[in-house]
Image (tube, rainbow, N blue to C red):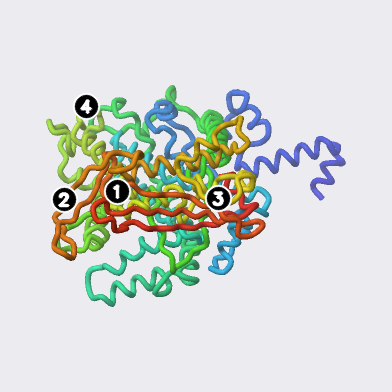
């Protein structure tokens, strides 16, 4: 009745404007339409200042300070990494909810649901790309935020517990991203998770302890319906809930102590972040919020552009063949943000099991050191010292030791990540390595990406790697550029894993007599080239196209190489994959 009375008194237009003003003021906890317009125009606020009320009375802004020190509103020293981490949480939540609507965590349907999202759901492929690319960016941003905090000394007293909550958020981010790795239920996801959780079997103590931990994580002796459901619930319920709780705790501690100023802005041992002079205040409304809206637009543009135009594995989310517990891919690798652990697991620790040393000693000790570092520093710190370790000062010149330690650790992690790749201490036979590059068991490849129209034009036949020259001439009727590119890549791969002794192709052989002996007691001779060891000598390799159905080509790679001394065949390998019309491998 009140609105009707206002209409009678003021007229419909003015009553509607007054009601809208009231709704906006309630929603913003204090700002009416004129206040918002004045803030955007840069006008001085009325008194008492309504722009401060949302931070005291509102739900959305109560964890944000009403004003900031001007020094922390620039790109340096925060690089906007803290805000960007929060933005990525919101981004992943929105895109994840969209994907949840079309996904069922059940092995019989999960894989087909992924293909349904990518092919039938409107904007499904884009949303999956946005979610996957956003997850990679989120891990990187949170890690960079923690590293920035360490470099600028912002973890020092009184912000030790803020650092601890940040470490918790980093760990939750890593586990959250990894828990979503299994959900596509393809070969890459299945085997990467299987290898990762198998470390639980090596836990110290009675064998039954490791088996039960493994059963708890997997839900069965091998990952199946129980394991997929566990990872799904972790990914969409338990971990996001914990992430939300600790995000609010982290924000509360940041507001409580204030954003730390640049290291050179304060006297040694002082913390003046909460004492902001009036002439150096930058108010959240309108300056900071409009700045954040601009950054939101820029980051959204970056994420959408990356999801649409970056290649598979960077922006676009790939999907392999259906998970198959009976077939192990040649190279199983962890996600890039966990490949450092896979690299450590390859190392030998004498009689000790590397899984025990890495999973139950090295990683836990390293994690504990990260968590307690601010308190450890406080226990041993001095105002300054020549070494630059455990000092009160946040200034770079006084912290040379601490900064050197941080940079050495980053270099160590980069090397560890490389160690986690198949390039380090992982090697199968040379013929399988070539097949894995050109026609891998999982994933996309030059040969599978040859367009169906080119395969139809080429027809059936057997081709050598050097035949690419016959398909690379635009004036020739046999012009097939993608097939020529695949054969050229085949030639390059053969060049890396082969050598010549009697033939006229590939790199010269280097003969190496090893300490191994054969069944007759003779020393084993292996052959290297300048690129790698134990290569094929004068091999014969080919690729065969066979049309097995009207809409199906079989692509077969064959390898054969003999011992140059005995003539005995030592390499003989064949791999076949099928290329279906309409599978659109070329789009990847």
In the picture, residue 575 is in which quadrant? bottom left
Label number found at residue 513: 2
Q: Nearer the viewer, mark 4 or mark 2?
A: 2
Instruction: Tell me the distance, in whole angstroms, between the alpha carbons under discs 1 and 3.
Output: 27 Å
In the picture, residue 428 is in which quadrant? bottom left
Instruction: Name the N-terminal-most of marks 1 and 3.
Output: 3
Instruction: Give the percent coordinates (x, y) of residue 348.
Output: 19, 57
Q: Which residue is mark 3?
A: 461
Q: Is residue 57 at least partly visible in the picture?
A: no
Label 2 Cα crowd, 10 Å radius (few <14 / some 14-19 / many 20+): few
Instruction: Tell me the distance, in whole angstroms, between the alpha carbons under discs 4 and 2.
Output: 55 Å
Instruction: Tell me the distance, in whole angstroms, between the alpha carbons under discs 4 and 1.
Output: 52 Å
Q: Is residue 413 left or right of residue 487?
A: left
Instruction: Name the N-terminal-most of marks 3 and 4.
Output: 4
Instruction: Tell me the distance, in whole angstroms, between the alpha carbons under discs 3 and 2.
Output: 40 Å
Q: Nearer the viewer, mark 4 or mark 1?
A: 1
Q: Nearer the viewer, residue 286 or 305?
A: 305
Q: Residue at x 61, y 30 (%)?
A: 475
Instruction: Name the N-terminal-most of marks 4 and 2.
Output: 4
Residue 464, above or below 403: below
Q: Residue at x 73, y 40 (%)?
A: 20
Q: Which residue is mark 4?
A: 397
Instruction: Give the percent coordinates (x, y) of residue 472.
Output: 54, 34
Q: Residue at x 13, y 63 (%)?
A: 521
Q: How many numbered marks appear? A: 4
Q: Nearer the viewer, residue 512 or 71?
A: 512
Instruction: Tell me the distance, in whole angstroms, between the alpha carbons under discs 2 and 1.
Output: 14 Å
Q: Nearer the viewer, mark 3 or mark 2?
A: 3
Residue 391, above or below 119: above
């Amino acid at each position: 009745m009140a609105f009707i009375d206002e209409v009678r008194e003021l007229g419909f237009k003015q009553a509607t404007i007054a009601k809208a003003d009231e709704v906006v003021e309630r929603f913003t906890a204090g700002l009416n339409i004129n206040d918002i317009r004045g803030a955007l125009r840069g006008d001085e606020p009325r008194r008492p200042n309504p722009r401060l009320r949302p931070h005291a009375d509102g739900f959305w802004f109560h964890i944000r300070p009403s004003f900031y020190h001007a020094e922390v509103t620039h790109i340096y020293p925060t690089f906007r990494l803290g805000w960007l981490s929060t933005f990525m949480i919101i981004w992943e939540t929105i895109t994840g909810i969209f994907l949840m609507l079309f996904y069922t965590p059940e092995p019989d349907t999960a894989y087909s649901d992924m293909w349904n999202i990518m092919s039938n759901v409107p904007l499904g492929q884009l949303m999956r790309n946005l979610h996957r690319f956003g997850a990679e960016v989120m891990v990187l941003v949170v890690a960079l935020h923690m590293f920035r905090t360490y470099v600028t000394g912002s973890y020092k007293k009184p912000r030790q517990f803020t650092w601890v909550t940040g470490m918790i958020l980093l760990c939750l981010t890593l586990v959250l991203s990894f828990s979503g790795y299994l959900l596509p239920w393809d070969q890459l996801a299945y085997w990467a998770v299987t290898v990762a959780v198998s470390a639980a079997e090596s836990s110290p103590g009675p064998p039954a302890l490791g088996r039960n931990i493994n059963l708890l994580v997997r839900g069965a002796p091998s990952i199946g319906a129980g394991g997929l459901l566990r990872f799904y619930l972790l990914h969409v319920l338990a971990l996001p809930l914990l992430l939300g709780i600790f995000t609010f705790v982290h924000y509360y501690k940041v507001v409580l102590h204030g954003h730390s100023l640049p290291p050179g802005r304060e006297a040694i041992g002082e913390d003046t972040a909460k004492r902001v002079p009036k002439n150096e205040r930058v108010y959240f409304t309108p300056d900071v919020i409009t700045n954040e809206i601009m950054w939101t637009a820029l980051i959204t543009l970056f994420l959408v552009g990356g999801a649409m135009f970056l290649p598979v594995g960077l922006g676009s989310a790939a999907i392999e063949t259906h998970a198959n517990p009976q077939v192990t891919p040649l190279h199983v690798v962890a996600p890039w943000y966990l490949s450092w652990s896979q690299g450590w697991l390859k190392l030998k620790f004498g009689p000790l099991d590397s899984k025990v040393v890495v999973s139950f000693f090295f990683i836990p000790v390293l994690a504990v050191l990260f968590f307690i570092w601010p308190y450890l520093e406080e226990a041993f710190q001095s105002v300054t010292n020549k070494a630059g370790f455990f000092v009160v000062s946040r200034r770079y010149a006084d912290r040379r030791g601490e900064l050197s330690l941080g940079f050495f650790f980053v270099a160590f992690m980069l090397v560890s990540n490389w160690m986690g790749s198949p390039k380090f201490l992982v090697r199968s036979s040379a013929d399988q390595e070539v097949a894995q590059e050109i026609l891998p068991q999982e994933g996309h490849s030059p040969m599978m990406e040859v367009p169906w129209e080119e395969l139809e034009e080429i027809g059936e036949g057997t081709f050598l790697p050097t035949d690419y020259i016959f398909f690379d001439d635009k004036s020739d009727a046999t012009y097939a550029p993608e097939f020529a590119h695949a054969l050229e890549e085949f030639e390059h791969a053969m060049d890396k894993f082969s050598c010549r002794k009697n033939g006229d192709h590939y790199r010269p052989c280097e003969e190496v007599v090893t300490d191994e002996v054969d069944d007759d007691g003779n020393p084993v001779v292996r052959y290297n080239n300048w690129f790698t060891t134990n290569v094929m000598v004068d091999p014969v390799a080919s690729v065969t196209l066979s049309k097995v159905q009207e809409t199906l080509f079989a692509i077969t790679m064959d390898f054969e190489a003999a011992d140059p001394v005995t003539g005995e065949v030592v390499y003989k390998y064949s791999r076949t994959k099928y290329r279906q019309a309409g599978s659109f491998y070329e789009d990847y």
